[in-house]
Image: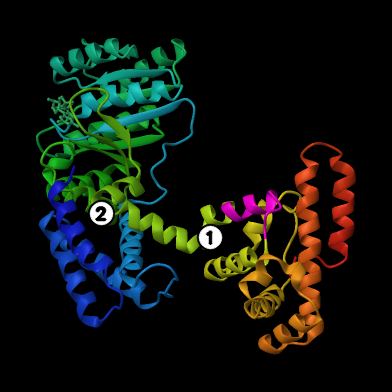
Amino acid sequence: MFESLTDKLSSALRNLRGVGKLSDENMAAALGEIRTALLAADVHFRVAREFVERVQAQCAGQEVLKGVTPGQQIVKIIHDELVRLLGEGATALSAARPLKIMLVGLHGSGKTTSAAKLGRLLKKRGYRPFAVACDVYRPAAIDQLEILARQEELGFYADRASRDVPAIGRAGLDAAMAAGADAILFDTAGRLQIDEGLIDEVRRLGDATKPDEVLLVADGALGQEAVNVAKVFHDALQLTGLIMTKLDGDARGGAALSIKAITGTPIKFIGTGEKTDDFDAFYPDRLASRILGMGDVVSLVEKAQESIDGAEAERMAEKMRKADFNLEDFLAQMQQVKKMGSMQSIVGMLPGMSGVQLGDDAELQMARTEAIIRSMTIQERRKPEVLNGSRRQRIAKGAGVKIADVNQVVKQFQQMQKMMKMMKMMKGGGGKKMMRQMEAMRGKGGFPGM
Ligand code: GDP
């Protein structure tokens, strides 16, 4: 899907993601490439221009994150903008039951096929779907829908003798209700091009059946033309969503990327082949990741934003659980925490500590504790029991603190060690008593900030 667009955007971003320092020049070059790629994919010029402007504005106001390059951060901004463009969060179907869906669109757009595909998908979601044939001009279309409905084991209604579309719709609805269906799909007639007669007929069918969803089936391979078609249908019928078909073929992506921005109507489903299984709910973030081909960078930046290195925290928590945690580990842990910005999540991983909230001055205390540990030798960090009076004095001097501060850190660390040992034993049993002892200890101060 959208290979050419994917290639071009990926190459623009590949150049960008390695950039350690952003300048007006490298930004302008990358944004220019992105804009060219969008236009080449037949994205509406206004959409392409606004997209680049939004990315530019966001980059300007962005705080630099630790652990990622500015280039990577921009890739994430572009990804998020792409998701927004594709219609973030607006792609779910109405929750109404029974759910009445009217499918409209031009002849050959894939309407009848999509009715069957959607019926199949709804069935998988637990609905009992029912198809109503409302194309009174093409007997072949009625036959096609009937065959597909049989094949997918959907309910089906047609009246081959009637030309009264609203009456067929109402009768179809009654038949669906009588059959115990709770998702009714109305397949309407199409034309080769939009005309008033077609629109009027669909409008009257809508008045008769009061659909919860009016979905336009649009041929994605048509590019900008599909956008124009959507605009006319939307103005006339108040569409609730789109089914974009034929994205498996040589669709360049322009229609998919422009249609939400231009018409305000979100894509809800995509057709990706001729088989009834070639059909998916539309997820803007998935398509955005696919188009950019940069899922790794996006999740990297998300991680940095979440600001916690889960693996490292888990490793440390494991050491604590085994009571095999010395001051050196604690220092490493503090480095990690500083890089990530929050100790809360690590504390939350410790047995018995999940409810503990860190105090506001935790950072300050942590800085002092860090200075004290840094003034120790490796041996002292690994075996704090060697810390006699003269060593403590030396450390206090080195860290620029009072000897009492050093004593406090050592004492608190010893308490913490005791607690870890207890937790280790607690696994066997007698947990409640241990917990009470731990509570009492925590009352005595615990480790800085805890
Ligand atoms: P209708 O006139 O709008 O009802 O269109 P049809 O459902 O009859 O589809 C027209 C043609 O497009 C048929 O040959 C379908 O098999 C084909 N078609 C529909 N959807 C897709 C799709 O997502 N991908 C591909 N490749 N073909 C499709």
Residue 299, visible in the rendered structure: yes
- Under circle 1, the secondary element is loop
Viewer-proximal residue among 211 and 58 = 58
**Quadrant the C terminus occupies:** bottom right
Q: Residue at x 69, y 49 (%)?
A: 321
Horizontal arrangement in the rendering, residue 307 relative to residue 88 (left or right): right
Is most of the magenta stretch helix, strand or loop? helix
Looking at the picture, how far across and down is residue 208, in whole percent? Answer: 36, 27
Horizontal arrangement in the rendering, residue 219 relative to residue 288 (left or right): left
Cα distance between the residues tagged 2 and 1: 25 Å
Q: Residue at x 20, y 70 (%)?
A: 30
Looking at the picture, how far across and down is residue 51, in whole percent? Answer: 26, 65
Number of the label disc, if any, that sits on residue 308: 1
Looking at the image, is 248 positioned above or below residue 179?
below
Looking at the image, do the residues carrying marks 2 and 1 touch, with CB atoms under 8 Å apart? no
Tag nearer the camera, 2 or 1: 1
Quadrant of the picture in which ligand 1 is shown: top left
Q: Amino acid at mark 2?
A: Leu
Number of the label disc, if any, that sits on residue 279: none
In the image, the residue with mark 1 has its CB under 8 Å from the nearest atom of ligand 1:
no
Q: Give whichever of discs 2 and 1 has the lower sequence position.
A: 2
- The span shown in magenta is 315-325
- Under circle 2, the secondary element is helix
Looking at the image, is 193 positioned above or below residue 363?
above
Residue 323 drawn in magenta: yes
Q: Amino acid at mark 1?
A: Ile
In the picture of the structure, the residue carrying the numbered disc 2 is 292
